[in-house]
Amino acid sequence: MRTTLAIAATLIATAAHAETFTWAGNTDPQTMDPHAVNSAPVLGFLNNVYEGLVRRGKDMTIEPALATSWEPIGDGEGWRFILRQGVKFHGGQEFTAEDVIFSYERASSEQADTSSWFAPVSEVNMVDDYTVDILTTAPNPIFPDSIANWMIMDAGWAAENGAERPAKDAENYATLNANGTAAFQLVERQPGLKTVLEPFAEWWGDAEHNITRTEFTPIQNSATAVAALLSGDVDMINPVPIQDAGRIASRDGVKVIQGIEARVIMLGFPHQAAELKYGADAGQPNPFADAKVRQAVAHAVNVPAILQTIMRGNAEAASQLVSPAMRGYSSGLAERPAYDVEGAKALLAEAGYADGFSFGLKCPNDRYLNDEAVCQAITGMLAQIGLKAELDAMPVRNYWPELREDNFDMYLLGWSPGTFDAEHPIRFLASTPNEEKKLGSWNFGDYSNARVDELLPMIQSEIDDAKRQGMLDEVTQILQEETAYVPLYVQPLVWGAQENIELTQRPDDFFILRWVTVN
Amino acid sequence: MLAYIIRRVFQSLVVLLVVGLVAFSMFRFVGDPIDNMLGQERTQADVERLRTQLGLDQPFPVQYYKFLEQAVQGNFGISYRQSRPVSEIIAERAPATLELAAVSGLFALGLGIGLGVFTAIRRDGIASNLIMSLSLVGVSLPTFLIGILLIYVFSVELDWLPSFGRGETVAVGGWTTGFLTPSGLKALILPAITLGLYQMTLIMRLVRSEMLEVLRQDYIRFARARGLREKSVNFRHALKNTLVPVITVTGLQLGAIIAFAIITETVFQWPGVGLLFINAIQFVDIPVMAAYLMLISVMFVGINLIVDLLYFAIDPRLRIDGRH
Amino acid sequence: MTDFPLPSATKRPSRFKTAWDSDFAYAFRKSPVAIISATMVFLLMAAAVFAPLIAPFNPFDPASLNLMNGFTPPSEANAFTGDSFLMGTDDQGRDVFSTILYGMRISLFVGFAAVLFALVLGVTLGLIAGYVGGWTETLIMRIADVQLTFPSILVAMLITGVAKGFTPVEYRDQLAIVVLIVAIGLSDWVQFARVVRGATLVERNKEYVQAARLIGRSGPAIMVRHILPNVLSPVLVIATISLALAIIAEATLSFLGVGAPPTQPSLGTLIRIGQDYLFSGEWWILFFPAVTLLALALSVNLLGDWLRDALNPRLR
């Protein structure tokens, strides 16, 4: 009986195939729980199923979602959100302030990976069924921007199914099931195999898409993903390997959608280490403590050549820790150090390293686009000024522990600000590391500058945009003058799709289904 | 006999424990699972808390003991990445691998025996020499490249077969099968060829050399002399006698097929346990890695045990040997 | 006692000698496949050994590379630099021809070293297991079972991890090759051990061994002097085929991310890199290394195949 039913279901599915939109990504969202994991594949996927109080539009600006409006309370005490009325969850439940309070408690709980978003929050109060006050410990002008991925779950549904808290070490109903308010609802979930979504008929918004059913499949091997697109087995893939972009673009029936991602790729240095750790000069005093040496590196790396060949002209050079698309970008400081071998050699000589030295360069080989090839190219370029880099490329599962243990003389890092604001990398990469204050947690090289540390809290609480930008510019200038990092380029976003698919690519690499049209 | 079996089973259990121990002691070198489980905004306190929660702060013998205690009851813990019971995940993924292994095993066996017989009978023919040499081409390129080339030719250029996955599957009880739908059957072709090519070559060569050997034996000559038809001599007598070693080798290779399905599954995005294992390594999902290895060990050790016991039953000389 | 006639022992060298002097050499001369594949193996090995003399560039020297030369098609001038390369260049601007020659060195080195490692380990353990028997045998063969359980990919990853844990920080970069050799060797020794053990079990009960034992020869001496020569031909066949397998295995491990580093690529690493360009039109980055690997592995395989037939007197 069960078999017959299943076969019948298969037949129906095959018949409906014409309207089904299938797409493939290289990572399966590991859970359907919006608070369990703070990673782009999960949050990007779940943005189609769950919604937050606010959401990001096609150009990344914040726009109303489950909240129709919001305003500051008093003199920076917090924010008041007015909730949308008549919104239904996929299970039919009414959306109210109670769900917001519950979702705050859930997402900020110890078990949640998203709890850091709520570090500035002191309390959340329900004013009435459709009004919520979120109070912050200090004035926080960018708070609404920082919660676009905080998704609201139905309180009753979670309680019924024992999913009041996310869990990492136990089974949880919310891991395989979802109950959000967004334009699509979860119909079928087979982890690592496929995830099926269908439009939610009672969604509060106006549908811009014409999809009746969608199916997501992870395909890890990039060549297989490209083959799947070219053979028409899927309608869209993300990402397209950068070298295949040209071919796909020129082929009939398929197209490439390109953009610039939020992620800046940069080189980092050990600022406080006493000695070099790798290569023939291991044990010698650390030359990278000298800003001149770091500047020499900045001038020696031929970024245009990397963009031209390895990135195939798809990426843009970077001058600072954030890309121009981010809020708070310092547009007056957009120039990056020129490629200048002689200048670099002169700087090395000035620093007392005219004959160069050898050191170890650490690099991931499965984290960023063509990361290993970029490191290899950098090794060659540094060799031109007498810096002999011993390249050690490894999978990311070994990479972070290695960096955390300070096992590097130079390293490659990519940073994508979760808040889409220039404050984010200052907090994580440029502040003196301080476990208690949760500062500098990814500042592996222990870069430290008193003025930067002083400016950060001021930036965080400044309401006036111009004053805030002035302080951000000052930090950027300091980082550039001291060459704290060498920003290289902004990573490109390359998606591939069948010719008849219209879609919108957002710089955070989130694929939003409600902007998809199948012609 | 009984004493031998008991001792042999006991040895197998020891092997399993050793496999578990070796694997377990080395997992920590694969990478740090915690790093993969927390996002970029985590703090050191989060890391410590999760480490304690997962029991990773305990000494390794304690971790191993706990793992064994649970594993004996069929509980392999919760996957770090998927937050679901490992036994459930493996049960979901196993049908894909087993079906692929079965089809590629049949492909290897069928074509291997057929071509083996052919090349043995027409020993000096041009066709059989060509087959012998061509079969080596298949084992002279890495599997992943063969898979990708097959995809390129048959999915992208010719558009005959799907490039990835299992196609539509049908659930029969807890088992998902691709045998009942046209797309499921089509999806099996390329991965099965990729996976079975090596074993096919192996079996073909084995059948050929065994056949050549048997065909020289006196009773075959005698059968020919008696005027039996060539076909009957070749198939009824000669082939029958070559099958024992062939089946033994195939049995041993079945384990190898499943173990090496890892690469084929990665290339074709085949949702089996091999792909699961590769993912587990990528994300340092220790419970999944441990369970996978234990299962593979049970299978290998089981097959070995059965083969040994069969030999023991067939060959009386080994009985004296077994008394040591 | 000392002048006790040892029929098998006196017959043995002559059998070996005859095979080598007449039949074997004759069979070789008569087989075009054997001649061609042996020539091919010889040429490729020579090319690898003399790579520094033949190759126009040294692809392992990062300072000599110009990134702007990247993706130059074979025998065409680069659009930016005007340089031209026989087989084109890869993504780093490396000359593909030179890289293949140097890469083949690494592949062959890893292959030979891994097979040697497996051979020594497998033959030793197989001899001991077969000759000594008892608990020793049980132990060795059960270890072989454990070994078979581990896919070589996992062995490689575990060894990498362990080695990283134990080696001083500054030597880690050179580890990859050693890890490959040990990983491939470890997954291969069982074959040798099984064959040698089986053959030893048979030989052990033969009169000449019993006679040698009677005259008081020590265990190791008997194993090495009397039993070993009798199992050499299957070992030689397995070794040849293992060499081809090891070269392929190295390529597979590269695909899974535990192969030779891209700064010192083997043929396998080159193919792994090249497969990224299968759809993008830069066919030469995959094609030339793949054809070289195919030629190498195929001719070694053909040679091994022929050896098996030639050394098996029953098939002649």
Image (cartoon, coloured by chain):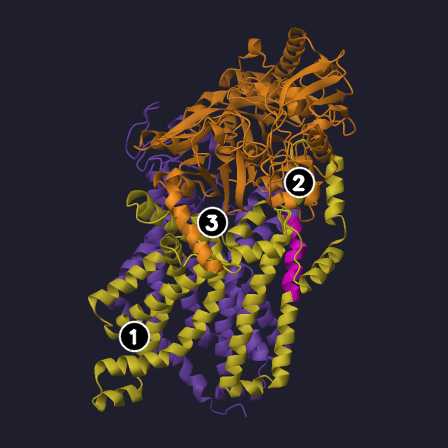
Chain colours: A orange, B yellow, C purple
Residue A275 is left or right of residue A218, and the answer is right
Please give the range of residues in magenta: B17-29
Residues at marks 1 and 3 on the same chain:
no
Residue C250, given in percent of the width and then of the height, sits at 46, 52
Instruction: Determine the chain carrying the residue at label 3.
Output: B
Q: Secondary structure at mark 2?
A: helix
Residue C61, given in percent of the width and then of the height, sits at 46, 35
Residue A128 is left or right of residue A380, and the answer is right
Residues B125 and C310: in front is B125
Q: Which mark is residue A157?
A: 2
Residue B135 is left or right of residue B271, and the answer is left
Residues at marks 2 and 1 on the same chain:
no
| Above/below status of A372 relative to A125 | below
Taking the image as drawn, is residue A4 in sight?
Answer: yes
Residue wearing tag 1: C23
**Residue mark closest to the camera, 2 vs 3:** 2
Neighbor class of circle 1 (other Cα within 10 Å; few <14, some 14-19, many 20+) is some
Q: Secondary structure at mark 1?
A: helix
| Above/below status of B118 relative to A103 | below
Residues B146 and C288: in front is B146
Residue wearing tag 3: B266
- Classify residue C241 by image quadrant: bottom left
| Above/below status of B273 relative to C87 | below
Neighbor class of circle 2 (other Cα within 10 Å; few <14, some 14-19, many 20+) is some
